[in-house]
Amino acid sequence: MKDNAASRRRGFTLVETVIGVAVFVIVAMAVYGSYVNLFRFMNSAQYQELAVDLAEEQMEIIRNMPYSDVGVIGSIPNGNVLYEQTYLRGGATFTVKTIIRNIDLAADSVAGGTPNDTAPNDNKLVSLTVSCNTCNNMIPFSIVGQVAPLSLESSGNTGSLFIHVHDAVGGSVQDADVTTVNTQGTSTITIHDVTDNTGKLALVGVPPGSRAYHITVGKIGYSSDQTYPLGGAGNPNPINVDANVVTGQVTSVDFFIDRSAALSVSSVSPLCAVVPAYHFNITGSKQIGTGVPKYSVNHVTNASGQLTLPTMEWDTAYAITPNDSVYDLAGLNPANPLSLNPGAAVSLQLVVVPKNPRSLMVSVTDTSTGLPLSGASVRLVGGSYDTTKITGQGFLNQNDWSGGAGQVDFTNPTQYFADDTNVDVTAVPGSIQLRNAFGNYNSNGYVESSTFDTGTISNFYNFIWSPTNEPASTSIRFQFATSPSSTPPLGWNFFGPDGTNATYYTVSNSSFNSVTNGNQYARYRAYLATEVSTSTATVSDVGFTYTSDCIPPGQVLFQGLSAGNYTLTISKTGYNTVVSSTTISSNWQEKQQSLSQ
């Protein structure tokens, strides 16, 4: 008994030990975490102090230099100071960037003022920024000071260059990086500087030159802008030409930059299937010269049909055009032209179909709102071509049943799911009709389709079949079924126009009952009947229209066109009908049309 009691006591002590060790580890980890954070804070504070000391040290060195030497090497004012230097302090490498500029004091008027100050380089401003990429949590430190000459300014053979940087709406962009380069002299002049809180940078005491100063403006997270040489390759007539500087005068140059936009592109089929490696072009409306867009780039989506462009420049009208050898562009959402606001994140869906040139994509919008207009009838007529499509609606159909029954999913367009053996799918190619046995047609029969997949949750609009004219003694009726699943657990429920299984669609182009909406998968049943044994009902084409996330609003695509002139008629209830002519001359082109009420 004593041994058992001792054993129990030992077991209890072991549990206590385990719990105690666990508590110790938790406390120790918390203490260790606090210690690490404290150590990091101390390190950060130490690095910050070293940065301050280094900045003050460099400022003192510059203040003790001869006034004529106070300037960045190869810049304006030219001097003996390097724009960028590195120093080792406290085991860390610090980078010191120095900006020195002439400043124009108001005491004797200013450049461009009344009267005009023809020698505006009164004093020099010195700006030092110390940073360390490897110092944990250290914030770059900046210090600014002025250096004055011992004697009054003297008139020189120089001018002034005023640079203004604006955002998309004309506001000021402060702290924009400005690089100004002049390569026309005996030695290159390079000026690195930033704009002030009014978006302005005033460069005074600048040597004169004709189209001598190439200026580039940018900022982290922003677009960029620049001047261009006159007669340059690819842009011989630029809008913003490299700047002049004239002795005793002020040259002003304006630039526009703003926050970058992010564009995410996906390429899919109308059934939402991924289409990889789709090639297309994006061209913006901004121009840097006569007929030269600022942005025009060919792109391609990846193996997953995706492309991310995180640093797009804002623009009100980017045009998307296809240049793929396999697929045509059937529509895009949002529609052309694409607008990107500063800082915006926009998703662009390209809906593509197998190429069948020549093709015409028609985009219809509401005149008052500019928004895509779905449900508009678009008819294209030319020669023997006469086709009508509805904007914003997809279309799935079947016109061959010769492959027979037994197919669950609609993958082979010549097969279907089932029949009652009273129909014949091979007697007339591309048609179904009642079976003829010994010279007499069966009195009735049905065919049930395979499962159509629209690719995503969809709404269903019209049920269409042909032919629409049958002998009086025969009849064709249909029912339609939809489901969120390709294998409904309770089977397929076929309904007619009242949303029950007691009615049938008997007129082609009938509207579906709303009970069909909100589903991805669909089937139809065709019921054929005859009153006399010498006649048969016949069906040659069955189809339906639908809308989904992969059917672009307000757009349709006509394919397989011949070159030449066509008439385009666009109509919608409540809107004015528009009739226009269009010439098909390329493999893919777009026609945009607005309708007014």
Image (cartoon, rainbow, N blue to C red):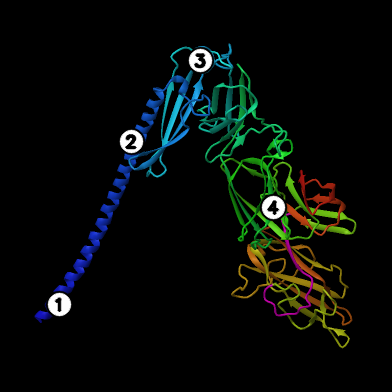
Quadrant housing the N terminus: bottom left
Give the left or right position of residue 15, taking residue 547 as reference.
Answer: left
Left-right relation of 379 to 269: right
Residue 49 in percent (x, y) is at: 33, 35
In the image, what residue type sits under mark 4? Answer: Phe
Position in image of residue 439 (x %, y %):
89, 86
Q: Is residue 397 magenta?
A: yes
User: Is residue 259 shown left or right of residue 524?
Assistant: left
Q: List x then y, in percent, for residue 367.
A: 74, 42
- Res 255 quadrant in image: top right
Residues at circles 2 and 3 in contact by the CB criterion of under 8 Å: no
Label 4 environment density (alpha carbons within 10 Å; few <14, some 14–19, many ≥20) = some
Q: State the extent of the magenta-drawn residues as a range.
A: 391-409
Q: Along the polypeptide, which appears first: circle 2 or circle 1?
A: 1
Residue found at x 66% / y 72%: 493
Q: Label 4 to label 2, Cα distance in Å?
A: 53 Å
